[in-house]
Image: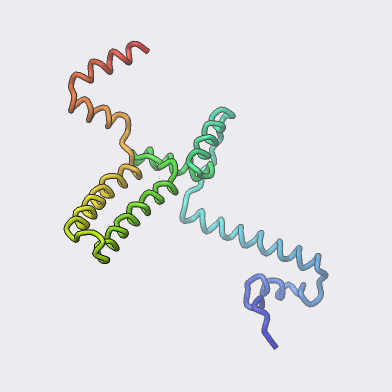
Amino acid sequence: MKKNSNTKSSVYVFLKSNGVLENGSPDDIQKVRKEYWREYKRKWRKMKRKSEQEFTITFSADDLKDISLEAKRHKLSRTKFIKRACLAYVNNSFIVPDLKEVRIISQMISMTYNSIQELIEKDTIDFKTGKAIQESIHNLEREILPKLHHPESLEEILKEQIQNKPKLKSRLLEFIESL
């Protein structure tokens, strides 16, 4: 006879220790099961609070609308968005709006690199040419991926452009004043 795998679970032990399995109705079993999970979650939250801090914050309807829109744009829950936005601010970085797309781009670059490697191995293209293309792809990957994960701020871009083209500063100031 096959032994029931539930006999070792903590829910089963709890139900058995309460005597509800032998004497209780299905409704009684369900009540005790709910009691078990309520107690389990209470203990889990208590342990979690010992290792991590939890905050409760409130938002106005307008703020909540803005947060909800941005969370949706970033394809995150509001809670994850708030946490990532806060940590990004603290670390002077950005939240990547679509991490899935960044991963797809990364995967495409890797697949292109591997395709060139296959062409080299099959002697479809010259070894020297293939290696030069692979080196270009590798350099492109090193340049693009960090920017996709950590895009420069507008301030950083403007500083860099003004350093390269000093006349741009006066044009930007004129533009800002015209607004």
Give the residue at x 46% y 43%: 83
Query: What residue appears at the point 76 percent right and 64 percent down from the top-left corner?
Result: 30
26 relative to 58 in the view: left or right: right
Question: Where residue 118 sits: x, y (%)?
Answer: 29, 63
Horizontal side of residue 80 vs 157, given as left or right:
right
In this rendering, is residue 85 above or below 50? above
Question: In the image, is residue 61 above or below residue 131?
Answer: above
Identify the residue at horizontal 63%, vertical 77% (top origin). 8
Query: x%, y% of residue 131?
Result: 20, 57
Picture coordinates of residue 41, whole percent (x, y): 61, 59
Residue that lies at the very extreme toward the top in this rendered image: 178
Placement of the N terminus among the 4 image quadrants: bottom right
Picture coordinates of residue 137 (x, y %)? 26, 51
Nearer-the-camera pick, 125 or 53: 125
In the rendered image, the residue lying farthest to the bottom is 1
2 to 97, vertically: above or below: below
Q: Nearer the viewer, residue 176 or 34?
A: 176
Which quarter of the figure has residue 19? Answer: bottom right
- The residue closer to the viewer here, 131 or 68, is 131
The residue lying furthest to the front in this view is 124
Tell how many labels.
0
